Image (cartoon, grey):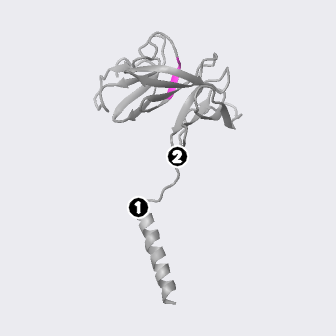
Amino acid sequence: STPTVNTRVTRVIGGQLYVSGATSTGPLFGIGTIGSGAPTTSGQTTTQLPGFPTASGPSSYDFFLDGNNAWVADDRTSGAGGIQHWTLNAGTWTLSYTLAPSATTGVRGLSVDLSGANPTLFGTTTDNKVVEFVDTGAGSLATILFTDTTANTAFRGIAVIPAAVPEPATAALLGVGLLAWFSSRRRN
């Protein structure tokens, strides 16, 4: 990708390659696309999503996009960091609000669970905690799930692992086993 200045996290979402970044010289203070689709050749152009700041702004790390909503982990510890919620309207992204674990804590890792009535956000913080927000809008409060006090360690990424669902072959074997058991019970 060109230019390649302080890129942080990449993801393919909906067939498009996205990247986060934050640098005082540009080109990226939030989320951008790299090329078109999921490119396989070098020299692709990084294009910032419309509406994200272009001269200064968030220190974006991880991110999650879903339709017209984006959540961006901002690791600033100056009172502006946390998990930003952005909305897309008429082709432009607008910062709606920021959910902060505290006034002096930023967020680096981010994972979003959309299975409930409200999005549940999980983040790793600059003060080495794992936090959870149930995103009901501005003012949603953080729940601290874990704190690591081990010297020289730091949490970075986090991922929500969906509940285990049996593979089709496993479910078929289970069904055959139950059928055989019921059949043997009927004969007795």
Mark 1, other Cα within 10 Å: few <14 / some 14–19 / many ≥20? few
Residue sitting farthest toward the right: 149
Residue behind mark 1? 168
- Label drawn at residue 161: 2
Q: Is residue 149 above or below residue 57?
A: below
Contact? badges 1 and 2 (CB < 8 Å): no
Q: Indicate yes or no whether the magenta region holds residue 77.
A: no
Q: Is residue 7 visible?
A: no
Residue 170 screen position, x and y as percent: 44, 64
The quadrant where residue 106 appears: top right
Q: Which residue is nearer to you in this view: 145 or 5? A: 145
- Kind of residue at disc 2: Ile
| SS for dot 2 | loop
Magenta part of the chain: 58-62
Q: How would you classify the magenta stretch by its main secondary structure?
A: strand
Q: Which residue is nearer to you in this view: 120 or 153? A: 120
Q: Is residue 88 visible?
A: yes
Residue 2 screen position, x and y as percent: 34, 19
The quadrant where residue 142 appears: top right
| SS for dot 1 | helix
Residue 169 screen position, x and y as percent: 40, 64
Residue 186 screen position, x and y as percent: 49, 86
- Kind of residue at disc 1: Pro
The quadrant where residue 104 appears: top right
Q: Indicate yes or no whether the magenta region holds residue 60.
A: yes
What is the spatial separation of the Cα atoms under label 1 and label 2, in whole angstroms? 19 Å
